[in-house]
Amino acid sequence: MQVCAPSYIDIYQSGLMEDRIDKLRSILNSCTLCPHECGIDRLNGEKGICQSGAKAEVSSAFPHFGEEPPLVGRRGSGTIFFANCNLRCAFCQNHDISHRSNGDGVSKERLAELMLYLQGIGCLNINFVTPTHYAAQIIEALSLAIDVGLNIPLVWNCSGYDSLEVIKLLDGIIDIYMPDAKFGDPEKAARFTTAHNYFEKAKPVLKEMYRQVGDMELDDNGIAVRGLLVRHLVMPEDTTGSMNILKFIAEEISQHTYVNIMEQYRPIFKAFEHPDIDRKITSSEYNEILRYAKEVGLYRGFNDH
């Protein structure tokens, strides 16, 4: 396929990006960047569930070779890991970053420099990890980076528990959406995260992401340039929840959706406080979910075991 410039170039050149930045920053005055809708004034030092303030907090920035193959190629995905999270998952593998604010507050100029650095060392994309609570700060920095020559795809690597309004404000800016689709069972979501209504809120968000970017598009080298990539982590004792999610993707988004059905769950952090998730998943649990994915017509992003 012919590879075009990222769509954010057009948004920037049209002047629309400044309007998007203004709208995103205004949300910080009474924060509703996610469905928790804490309503706190982050610009004046108040903090809500995600514990984020006025500045973006960056934990690390480096070429990542452990992401999905279409994002990595031979040069890596340029990940920028942001501190804090609105879900506070009991089993979070990055709990030192997401729960303990293990990051440095950065200016928009410094964040733009990180994007340009990752592009400069050859990364195939800029991969914003857990970004939505810093959407305003990221898009402000993006504007500066574009002005100095940023021109590779942007990946929005998020939890799925995002404000629909915010995702709509990213239309034409983000090239690749990579949300988690975590819990299809509200009882599990309520016990293991701060979001009892996770699936209810994630469904319209995933639909909007798909409306914006469509199915995953790859260039002639198999590298992602645009589209939706959904991650689903198979959990112990949660077959029904996984099936609910896969059925939703197949029936209400697209059977061509690239779905990474992940088997790497390991009990960590506070998982040992919950007997039903204090173990790894079994091969039979994982294979049951793979079979179901194929039954509902999904076929991209996962392999038989």
Image (cartoon, grey):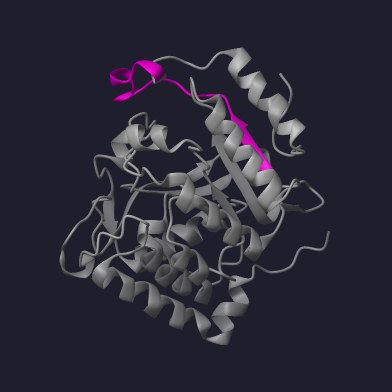
92 or 40: nearer the eye?
40
Q: Is residue 181 left or right of residue 298?
A: left
Q: Is residue 99 left or right of residue 186?
A: left
Q: Is residue 144 left or right of residue 28?
A: right
287 or 92: nearer the eye?
287
Can you give x and y, in whole percent of width and height, for residue 280 in the image?
47, 16
Q: What stretch is highlighted in magenta?
A: 258-276
Would residue 274 be counted in the magenta stretch?
Answer: yes
Look at 42% across and 55% down and name the residue there: 131
Would residue 129 be counted in the magenta stretch?
Answer: no
Can you give x and y, in whole percent of width and height, for residue 291 in the image?
72, 25
Report if residue 74 is visible in the image: no
Look at 65% across and 45% down and name the residue there: 249
In the depicted structure, whether residue 235 falls above or below residue 180: above
Look at 64% across and 26% down and name the residue there: 289
Q: Quadrant of the N terminus?
A: bottom right
Can you give x and y, in whole percent of width and height, for residue 169 in the image?
49, 71
Q: Quadrant of residue 73?
A: top right
